[in-house]
Image: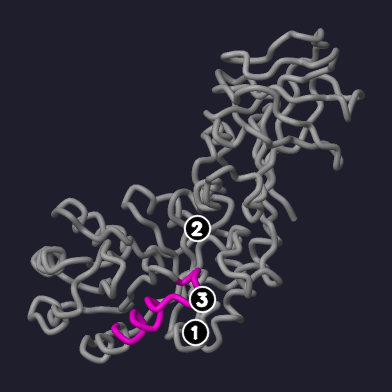
Amino acid sequence: MTDTASGSERADHGVPLPPASLRLTVDRDALAANWRALDALSGSAKAGAAVKADAYGLGAATCVPVLRDAGCDTFFVAHWSEVAAVIAHVPPQQVAVLHGVLNDAECAYARAIGAVPVINSLEQAALWTASGGGRCHLMVDTGINRLGIAASAANEAVIAALDIDILMSHLASADEADSAMNPRQLAAFQSVSGAIPHGRASLANSAGIALGADYAFNLTRPGLALYGGVPRPELAAAIRPVAQVQAAILQTRTLAAGESVGYNATFTAPAPMRVGTVAMGYADGFLRARGPGNAFSHHGRRLPILGKVSMDMVVIGLTTAPDLAAGDWVDVPWNITDAAQQNGLSPYEMLTVIGGRLRRD
């Protein structure tokens, strides 16, 4: 089953919007299958789901119900501003906020709605306790040096005062099988988990799941792999693509030999050729860096990008598809496992930069 974004469901002054000229299709069956596969690969641990950044750009309103129905019961966001979209579909106590609490207002919000902060520092721990305390999670830094208390702070009184459900850390190099950081971080986390009372322990992200049972503990936290990314080759057979992006052709024209295309005239037609202007640009997340050497497609026919990607438009060659006309749909290259068409972007960036005109309602 797929879920496709379009503009036709909204209305302005009672008048329905016409169909959109961009569409993002989310394969919900593939998303559910990916979670179930990662859950199985987690062994005795249960897989949660990172749904921050609007479910990695694919829409929390689309993805969270699918993950919930597949069996997921622990969801991770980064910001408090992301909570409302998730708790529209799951109980708030199943939602963890990775950035923790920075002030009394965030503590009050957390307590009022029931979402759970991930405490990241001694200051956050003291703030949470002073505001009334209650169930929380705790991040311990074991080497990535982003968020988390130092392992040496495990015995601090302010930590002992916390009611910790999930004790967690984050792997820095899980996508590198031979990295010495992985066993170092594992040993550090094992040591600190024995010193801090907690309910569940969690270390592995998507790539960490592939490191084996020692890294799984009670809960894994897949993100990218849920949405079709393959951070480790061991996961390739288990992960299915989830997102497809398509755009409509706005206009076609025939260039004469010597005519140029787009800003700075970076492409010049070597001979007469038919081209199409497509409703897709860097404002939609198809960044200018992805233009050189890339191509759109239609039923397997390659449609090379000509000139620079602009804010709302891309010009493509139609030599291989002379039948295409204005209004026809073409496939936008958004295969997040294909490094050749990413042009320097990571799979994470390809998903999370998806623009608002493609986002789910």
SS class of the residue under badge 1?
loop
Q: CA distance from mark 1 to mark 3?
A: 21 Å
For the residue pair 163 and 156, the one nearer the viewer reads as 156
Badge nearest the viewer, 2 or 3: 3
Q: Position of residue 46 (x, y in %)?
A: 50, 80
Badge nearest the viewer, 1 or 3: 3
Q: Which residues are magenta?
A: 174-188
Q: Residue at x 68, y 19 (%)?
A: 267
Q: Position of residue 69 (x, y in %)?
A: 60, 67
Q: Residues within 10 Å of mark 2 (few under 14, many from 20)?
A: some
Disc 3 designates what residue? 177
Q: Position of residue 240 (x, y in %)?
A: 69, 62
What is the image's colouring?
one colour
Q: Position of residue 106 (x, y in %)?
A: 21, 54
The type of residue carrying mark 1 is Ala
Disc 2 designates what residue? 89
Q: Is residue 137 visible?
A: no
Q: Quadrant of the C terminus?
A: top right
Give the answer, above or below, for where 232 lies relative to 102. below
Q: Residue 45: which numbered mark, if any?
A: 1
**Could you say which quadrant of the image residue 23 lies in?**
top right
Q: Residue at x 57, y 48 (%)?
A: 58
